Image (cartoon, rainbow, N blue to C red):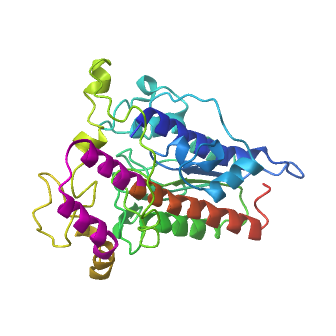
């Protein structure tokens, strides 16, 4: 939930990937290929190569081993859309015109994909865009509308909007690799931008129970009420105990679409799932949810339970991102592209 650090590490991970492919030695002055991988709200403690990690990310760690790991960096604006606009343009947000998530990105301005196109590159973007306008500067684009969905999400391309069957991280990986396989003559630049692990942290079926039984240490400042902090800190609605919703965030559902636990303003989790996916989801959470309702937790005990549920889902969602990075690395190595 620490947006500033999370956004910083999104950029660090993405730049690490780009640096890997641009900094390796190349023969005969061959133009370097570029793959820019971005995850969303991905904290450094959820990337094991940064040390003191809460999980294991062996494939991301391989990029750090073979390339560069950033330990000092800054973020110009940690909010999603402004951050993305800054990366594309290299300009501060008051200059590129996108200062909040509500603004629309002006795609007519100069961006690094356009410069690469002019230099003879084939360019593509797959995944989360979040800039409201259609992408420009890309020969191929297949993006999520808004935040996108974890299960059976819609994608938008130049032909329109279509629902795709599958898990969002896996689909972004598939579409990215499908595009890479078509690149033969020109150098390429691919922006591979994941939704995960953005709220509401819905793990893939194979990872949904990955951290069952694991108890993560509660941070020393977990019960800080921020009353002695600046107004900008304590007015943000980012408290695990106070602001996470029962079903959307914490997955507290008995499995029935109208089970009485869906809070005001929440949409039911099963909205995008097939019947089989929904049943698998219900079964995955059933035992812990039943115990939760029986225990009638209150106060600090309830807050800690929410923290553990959040950590389990958040880190399990990241496992798919690491798996995706591994698939890309494998493809590049198998096709003699990893060194360039």
At which x and y percent is residue 250?
28, 56
Q: Nearer the viewer, residue 318 or 129?
A: 318
Specify whether 8 is left or right of 117: left
Which residue is found at the position 47% from the left and 63% from the top?
169
Q: Give the total number of marks visible in the rendering.
A: 0
Can residue 110 be spotted in the picture?
no
Residue 296 image offset from top left, x and y in percent: 17, 56
Name the residue nearer the viewer: 158 or 75. Answer: 75
Could you tell me what secondary structure mostly forms the magenta stretch? helix
User: Residue 149 vs residue 20: left or right?
Assistant: left
Residue 28 shown in magenta = no
> Where's residue 127, x and y in %?
46, 57
Between residues 289 and 140, which one lies in front from this camera angle? 289
- Whether residue 115 is situated above or below residue 297 in the rendered picture: above
The image quarter in which residue 103 lies: top left
Residue 107: x percent and y percent?
44, 41
Identity of the residue drawn at 73% across and 63% down: 185
Instruction: Determine the residue located farthest toward the bottom in the rendered image.
Output: 276
Left or right, residue 339 beside residue 325: right
Q: Write the residue at 55% across / 31% down.
A: 90
Relative height, residue 95 to residue 267 (above, below): above
Q: Is residue 291 shown in magenta?
A: yes
Question: Can the viewer see residue 186?
Answer: yes
Magenta-colored span: 282-311
Q: Quadrant of the C terminus?
A: bottom right
What residue is drawn where x is 30% and y is 66%? 288
Name the quadrant of the N terminus: top left
Q: Nearer the viewer, residue 177 or 330?
A: 330
Q: Is residue 132 left or right of residue 49?
A: left
């Amino acid at each position: 939930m620490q947006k500033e650090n999370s956004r910083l590490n999104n950029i660090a991970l993405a730049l690490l990937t780009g640096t890997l492919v641009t900094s390796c030695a190349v023969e005969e002055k061959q133009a370097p290929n570029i793959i820019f991988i971005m995850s969303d709200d991905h904290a450094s403690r959820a990337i094991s190569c940064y040390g003191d990690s809460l999980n294991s990310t062996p494939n991301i760690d391989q990029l750090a081993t073979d390339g560069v790991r950033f330990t000092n960096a800054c973020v110009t604006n940690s909010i999603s859309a402004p951050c993305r606009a800054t990366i594309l343009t290299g300009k501060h947000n008051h200059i590129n015109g996108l200062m909040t998530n509500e603004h629309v990105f002006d795609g007519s301005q100069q961006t690094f994909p356009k410069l690469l196109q002019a230099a003879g590159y084939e360019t593509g973007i797959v995944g989360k865009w979040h800039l409201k306008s259609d992408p420009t500067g890309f020969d191929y684009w297949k993006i999520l509308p808004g935040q996108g969905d974890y299960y059976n999400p819609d994608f938008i391309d130049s032909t329109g909007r279509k629902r795709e069957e599958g898990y969002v991280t896996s689909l972004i990986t598939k579409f990215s690799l499908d595009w890479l396989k078509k690149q033969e003559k020109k150098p390429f630049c691919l922006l591979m931008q994941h939704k995960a692990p953005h709220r509401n942290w819905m793990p893939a079926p194979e990872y949904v129970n990955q951290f069952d039984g694991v108890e993560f240490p509660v941070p020393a400042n977990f019960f800080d009420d921020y009353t002695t902090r600046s107004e900008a800190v304590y007015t943000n609605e980012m408290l695990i105990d106070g602001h996470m919703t029962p079903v959307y965030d914490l997955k507290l559902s008995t499995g029935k679409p109208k089970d009485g636990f869906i809070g005001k303003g929440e949409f039911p989790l099963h909205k995008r799932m097939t019947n089989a996916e929904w049943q698998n989801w219900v079964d995955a959470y059933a035992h812990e949810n039943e115990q939760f309702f029986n225990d009638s937790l209150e106060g600090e005990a309830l807050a800690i339970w929410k923290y553990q549920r959040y950590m389990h889902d958040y880190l399990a969602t990241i496992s798919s991102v690491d798996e995706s990075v591994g698939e890309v690395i494998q493809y590049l190595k198998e096709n003699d592209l990893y060194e360039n």
